[in-house]
Image (cartoon, grey):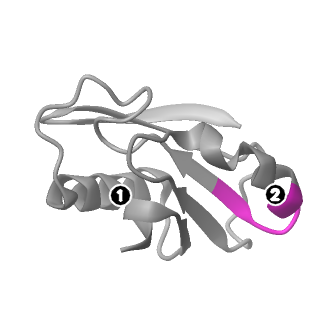
Amino acid sequence: MQERYIDTKSGKVFYWISNAWTKDKKTLFFLHGMTGDHTMFEEQVDYFVKDYNILLWDAPAHGKSRPFQQFDYDKAAKAIKQIFGAENISDAVFVGQSMAAL
């Protein structure tokens, strides 16, 4: 997995993408639960990476994406949109747990 980040007005948001990223594969975006981080889904990466692009993140104010000023869902959604732009992602399948399943 390749570590990357985006800069936002409230802080950096870190994410990881699979090494064999290709435009012909669908992208799975794994979103962890409250107080979690990207490591929550490390066990799933090996299973899916052969068939999908994998994107894990540390949501704003979580894991490596700290410090982050005043987490809210609007900022999280804007960060996802910014990551999509940075990685040229047009659509993805979201895999979430807890707060990420909302």
Looking at the picture, tell me which residue is in the foreground, 68 or 7.
68
- The residue at which mark 1 appears reads as 80
Circle 1: residue type: Ile
Return the mark for residue 14: none
Instruction: Give the residue displayed 73% in from the left and 71% down from the top.
Output: 25
| Start-end of magenta stretch | 47-54
Looking at the picture, tell me which residue is in the foreground, 66 or 92.
66
Provide residue 91's location: percent of width, then percent of height. 50, 76
Instruction: Give the residue displayed 67% in from the left and 49% down from the top.
Output: 41
Disc 2 and disc 1: Cα gap in Å?
A: 20 Å
Left or right? Give the position of 40 relative to 44.
left
Looking at the picture, tell me which residue is in the foreground, 40 or 14.
40
Secondary-structure class at tag 2:
loop
Task: Give neighbour class at mark 2: few <14, some 14-19, many 20+ (Cα, 10 Å).
Answer: some
Instruction: Give the residue displayed 71% in from the left and 37% down from the top.
Output: 1
Residues under numbered marks 2 and 1 in contact, where contact means CB atoms less than 8 Å apart: no
Circle 2: residue type: Val
- The residue at which mark 2 appears reads as 49
Looking at the image, residue 68 lies above or below residue 40: above
Quarter of the view holding residue 61:
top left
Provide residue 76's location: percent of width, then percent of height. 26, 54
Q: Is residue 40 magenta?
A: no
Provide residue 36's location: percent of width, then percent of height. 48, 41
Instruction: Give the residue displayed 68% in from the left and 74% down from the top.
Output: 26
Query: If you read the primary sequence from the N terminus, does the residue marked by circle 2 or circle 1 appear first?
Result: 2
Left or right? Give the position of 49 relative to 12.
right
